[in-house]
């Protein structure tokens, strides 16, 4: 039975990988050409199949499960790019642009709904419960965080992450250098979903926490890695 469950989970996650890559394949084609992009996508799919059993257990809770799954996608792609001579800066730019393309491909009503739900009483009550549960540290690979009540002016509510499943997983996989680029994607979510996210530090940068502060409809203030502050350029020929 356990083997059957594993097979089902692997098949489902690989289907999710295929759907996601379909949305962003044009970015790879633009950068590397159709033939190389196709070969690298297949290589990344095989790499992701190897990664799946190693993904951290976060209790099957959304959106955290989706976060770690996406980390697995980008880790697989990063490893393929590394093998073919690409730098972490180039891989990080691709991951960032891929996230932007993925979000833009989502229907506008879906983005508006997700933005609304991020501030709904039901979501916030669930977030508070999960924050309290996370402090028990029942799953070594899971997130550990605290809920921060809003100040009534500067932010509506906040979340301080003391441990991040994605950061811990990438460290265990020897790919900590990729983490800041995946954290940068929060800027895209904030811009497109209306989070009004303000963040001054992250675990990926070596701080002792990530300090998320949300203000509905407010401006996004998130520091990006230097490579993402520069205009996007063409990838080096490598590989």
Image (spheres, grey):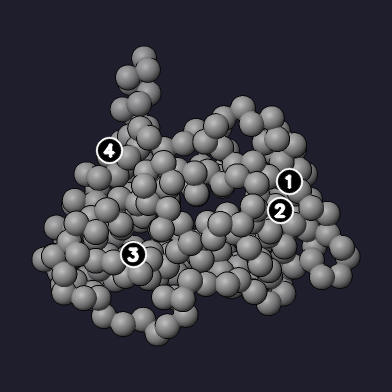
Horizontal and vertical percent position of residue 65: 51, 42
Query: Nearer the N terminus, badge 3 or badge 4?
Result: 4
Mark 1 or mark 3, which is nearer to you?
3
Could you say which quadrant of the image residue 94 lies in?
bottom left
Which of the numbered marks, if any, corresponds to residue 88? 3
Say which residue label 1 marks.
146
Front-lying residue, 179 or 214: 179
Say which residue label 2 marks. Answer: 159
Circle 4 sits on which residue?
50
The quadrant of the image that shows the C terminus is: bottom left
Cβ atoms under marks 2 and 1 closer than 8 Å: yes
Name the outermost residue toward the left: 35
In this view, the residue farthest toward the bottom is 231
Q: How far apart are marks 1 and 3 (CA)?
A: 31 Å
| Residue 68 seen in the current view | no
Task: Give the vertical position of 238 relative to 158 (above or below).
Answer: below
Circle 1: element type: strand
SS at mark 4? helix
| Of pointers 2 and 1, the one earlier in the residue sequence | 1
For marks 3 and 2, the one nearer the N-term is 3
Residue drawn at the location 61% of the way across and 57% of the way down? 207
Residue depicted at 49% across the width and 44% down the height? 168
């Amino acid at each position: 039975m356990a083997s059957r469950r594993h097979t089902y989970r692997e098949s489902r996650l690989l289907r999710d990988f295929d759907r996601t890559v379909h949305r962003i394949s044009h970015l790879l084609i633009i950068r590397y050409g159709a033939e190389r992009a196709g070969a690298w996508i297949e290589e990344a799919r095989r790499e992701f199949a190897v990664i799946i059993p190693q993904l951290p257990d976060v209790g099957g809770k959304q959106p955290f499960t989706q976060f770690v799954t996406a980390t697995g996608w980008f880790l697989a792609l990063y490893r393929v790019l590394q093998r073919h001579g690409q730098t972490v800066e180039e891989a990080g730019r691709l991951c960032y642009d891929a996230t932007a393309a993925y979000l833009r491909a989502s229907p506008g009503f879906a983005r508006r709904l997700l933005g609304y739900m991020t501030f709904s009483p039901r979501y916030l009550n669930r977030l508070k419960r999960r924050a309290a549960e996370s402090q028990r540290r029942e799953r070594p690979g899971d997130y550990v965080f605290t809920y921060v009540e809003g100040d009534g002016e500067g932010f509506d509510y906040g979340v301080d992450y003391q441990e991040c499943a994605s950061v811990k997983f990438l460290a265990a996989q020897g790919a900590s250098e990729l983490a800041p680029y995946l954290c940068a994607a929060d800027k895209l979510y904030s811009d497109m979903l209306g989070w009004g996210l303000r963040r001054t530090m992250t675990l990926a940068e070596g701080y002792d926490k990530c300090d998320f502060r949300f203000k509905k409809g407010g401006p996004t203030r998130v520091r990006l890695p230097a490579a993402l502050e520069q205009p996007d350029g063409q990838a080096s020929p490598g590989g």
